[in-house]
Image (cartoon, coloured by chain):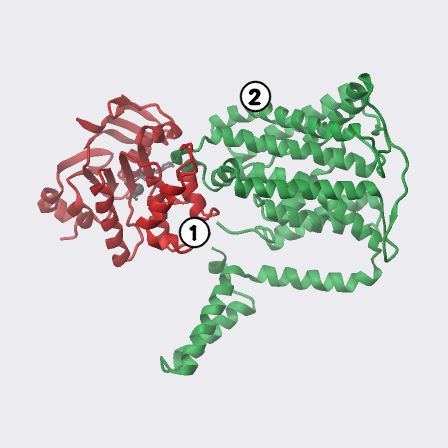
Chain colours: A green, B red
């Protein structure tokens, strides 16, 4: 419970103060009752609020107010788009963590695999049957990519389930600990990346593209139409995941299994099936995140997903591990921080920004900004 | 005929063996209570029955079927529902969602059954969207009971349903237990509150050190001087 650990900060101090004041007063008079009400309100706030929030909120507000005049709006806009891509990957990662209790280090490479499968679908499969094109509407890519998106998501989703059956389930049945699971996923990460290099070589690739005009926004910001597509699709997916988790039976069962797998089993929930659903959703989202990243960066590289792990984990940790809504907020914070930082530092260091935020947060508030204890 | 029959159960965790051959019978419509010192294996016995802990030797028969090696998600389907000692609700799910999960294996949306549960536990009906993690100990225990009742079980296993509750709420829990039993549901309880539990029980078992120690009618056990000395603080 959040309230128990709280010993600092002005709200608990206030609750303590009113408690001390309240004691000296005769019970039942107006002042005493008023104080009791105050005390109850403060206690209630104390349960939901903790010093971490106040500090984080204050720092965020100061940073935003202090930096805003110097920040290029274009970078902020770009940051939100990058944040949307991070969110698409991080939500899957955090769901898998919640249900299986280990950090899936192969998640970044599932993303890369998604992008390459889409590349295969667009450049080999569809063009072989005469479906090709680029510069679809205002976008640089062609409509074949819209066909490739769900196909690649399905392929990676299936692959994630197959790898679970082939590798993770065996380890799970032997009740190995989280470190062994994470090491196994590290092995799979390397294997998946190796497979990409064998099939598609290590060279830079691109989806077939055509240059397009960027849109001009107020405050000298510009936004490429591709970015609008990326952000729009990410929003649709996030809403989809939210509806799945809160409205469907399997989604609720996923949350229940994350809460307590043994209780889920004795309740009759087929937890193995729930785990497959989690892999399928996480893998499908990873594939789409990889495709969106390839569109955003206008290139595919075998290492693109591996390098994206740090922003992914930073977002997951920032939001409180296992909490999909937290991962969304964390992703936007990390995305904006990364992009805005490029105003002062070399863009190639922007992953370091995510890393620093992650380390500082782990030291200051290991449960994450929105993380719950217990 | 016995509803549940556990015969010579041997079980444990890893290398350590906790149960060294425990036998127990629950007949149709009965309330049976297990008492015994802390750590003697009462919870382990229940976990062995529902399949959370593997039975090494011995057998569990329920309604004439051997369910010894059934995984937990299959045991529930036989009409045997279980409420663990702690962590017995899904804290991040709402009250209503907890009940929906209780009915997971039912084909329908179980709305009618949820309303019945709200009738039985009016406290839960007041805030069906409240997160279970935000409930008080008593409300949680009620929710855990309601969740297990969603499937209309034939036998209900309750591991220390009164643990950590105030005497008033505890009384309410035992009252509910009696009401549930009156509808024909058999119950197997583990209880620290030996007096209260044995009073409502048809029969009782005393375990100690992972073995059967005593077995008798509920009131008879209450009168047993050894039980009184060891477990009733008298
Ligand atoms: N998951 C576990 N892994 C290893 N040992 C365990 C585990 N759970 C329980 N034990 C051990 O098994 C023994 C029996 O535990 P059990 O929970 O069955 O006792 P109990 O009779 O229910 O006790 P209590 O009255 O405290 O609930 C104890 O020594 C305990 O430490
Ligand atoms: Mg116990």
Q: Residue furthest top?
A: A128
- Quarter of the picture holding the N terminus of chain B: top left
Question: Which quarter holds ligand 2?
Answer: top left
Discs 2 and 1 lie in a common subunit:
no
Look at 71% across and 27% down and name the residue there: A113
**Residue pointed to by mark 1:** B128
Identify which residue, A150 or B218, lies in the foreground.
A150
Q: Viewed as shown, does residue B8 lie left or right of A21? A: left
Q: Is the distance from the Cβ of mark 1 to the nearest ligand 2 atom less than 8 Å? A: no
**Residue pointed to by mark 2:** A166
Q: Position of residue A41 (x, y in %)?
A: 48, 69
Total marks in image = 2
Can residue B220 be seen here? The reply is yes
Look at 14% across and 45% down and name the residue there: B227
Can residue B17 be seen here? The reply is no
Q: Position of residue B40 (x, y in %)?
A: 26, 39
Q: Secondary structure at mark 2?
A: helix
Q: Residues within 10 Å of mark 2 (few under 14, many from 20)?
A: few
Q: Position of residue A175 (x, y in %)?
A: 47, 29
Residue A139 tag number: none
Q: Viewed as shown, does residue A303 lie left or right of A172? A: right
Q: Is residue B155 above or below residue A132?
A: below
Q: Disc 2: which chain? A: A
Identify which residue, A330 or A202, lies in the foreground.
A330
Quarter of the view holding residue A23: bottom left
Q: Residues within 10 Å of mark 1 (few under 14, many from 20)?
A: some
Q: Is the distance from the Cβ of mark 2 to the nearest ligand 1 atom less than 8 Å? A: no
């Amino acid at each position: 419970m959040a309230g128990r650990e709280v010993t600092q900060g002005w709200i608990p101090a206030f609750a303590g103060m009113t408690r001390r004041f309240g004691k000296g007063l005769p019970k039942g008079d107006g002042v005493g009752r008023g104080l009791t009400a105050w005390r109850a309100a403060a206690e209630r706030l104390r349960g939901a609020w903790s010093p971490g929030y106040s500090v984080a909120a204050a720092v965020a507000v100061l940073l935003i107010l202090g930096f805003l005049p110097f920040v290029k709006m274009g970078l902020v806009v770009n940051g939100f788009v990058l944040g949307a891509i991070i969110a698409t990957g991080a939500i899957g990662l955090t769901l898998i963590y919640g249900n299986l209790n280990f950090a899936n280090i192969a998640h970044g490479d599932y993303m890369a695999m998604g992008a390459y499968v889409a590349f295969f679908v667009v450049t080999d499969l569809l063009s072989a049957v005469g479906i090709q094109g680029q510069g679809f509407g205002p976008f640089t890519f062609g409509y074949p990519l819209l066909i490739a998106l769900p196909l690649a998501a399905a392929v990676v989703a299936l692959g994630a389930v197959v790898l679970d059956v082939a590798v993770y389930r065996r380890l799970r049945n032997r009740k190995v600990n989280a470190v062994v699971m994470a090491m196994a996923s590290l092995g799979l990460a390397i294997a998946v990346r190796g497979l990409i290099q064998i099939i598609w070589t290590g060279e830079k690739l691109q989806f077939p593209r055509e240059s397009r005009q960027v849109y001009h926004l107020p405050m000298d910001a510009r936004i490429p139409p591709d970015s609008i597509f990326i952000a729009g699709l990410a929003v649709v997916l996030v809403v989809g995941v939210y509806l799945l988790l809160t409205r469907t039976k399997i989604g609720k069962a996923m949350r229940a299994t994350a809460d307590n797998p043994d209780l889920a089993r004795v309740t009759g929930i087929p937890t193995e099936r729930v785990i497959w659903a989690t892999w399928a959703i996480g893998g499908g989202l990873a594939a789409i995140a990889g495709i969106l990243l390839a569109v955003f960066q206008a290139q595919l590289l075998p290492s693109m997903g591996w390098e994206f792990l740090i922003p992914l984990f930073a977002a997951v940790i920032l939001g409180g591990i296992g909490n999909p809504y937290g991962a969304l907020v964390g992703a936007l914070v990390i995305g904006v921080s990364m992009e805005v930082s490029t105003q002062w530092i070399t863009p190639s260091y922007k992953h370091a920004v995510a890393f620093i935020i992650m380390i500082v947060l782990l030291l200051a508030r290991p449960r994450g900004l929105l993380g719950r204890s217990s | 005929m016995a509803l549940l029959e556990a015969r010579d159960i041997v079980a444990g965790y890893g290398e350590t063996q906790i149960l060294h051959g425990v036998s127990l019978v629950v007949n149709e419509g009965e309330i049976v209570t297990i008492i015994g010192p802390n750590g003697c294996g009462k919870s382990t016995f229940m976990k062995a029955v529902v399949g959370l802990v593997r039975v090494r030797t011995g057998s569990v028969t329920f309604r004439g079927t051997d369910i010894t090696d059934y995984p937990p998600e299959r045991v529930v389907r036989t009409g045997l529902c279980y409420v663990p000692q702690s962590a017995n609700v899904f804290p991040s799910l709402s009250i209503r969602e907890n009940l929906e999960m209780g009915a997971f294996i039912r084909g329908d949306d179980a709305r009618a059954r949820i309303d019945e549960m709200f009738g039985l536990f009016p406290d839960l009906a007041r805030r069906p969207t409240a997160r279970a993690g935000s409930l008080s100990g008593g409300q949680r225990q009620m929710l855990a009971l309601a969740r297990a009742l969603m499937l209309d079980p034939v036998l209900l296993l309750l591991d220390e349903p009164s643990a950590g509750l105030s005497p008033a709420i505890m009384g309410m829990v035992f009252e509910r237990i009696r009401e549930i039993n009156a509808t024909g549901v058999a119950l197997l309880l583990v209880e620290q509150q030996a007096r209260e539990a044995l009073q409502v029980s048809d029969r009782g078992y005393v375990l100690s050190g992972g073995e059967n120690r005593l077995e008798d009618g509920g009131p008879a056990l209450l009168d047993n001087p050894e039980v009184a000395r060891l477990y009733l603080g008298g």
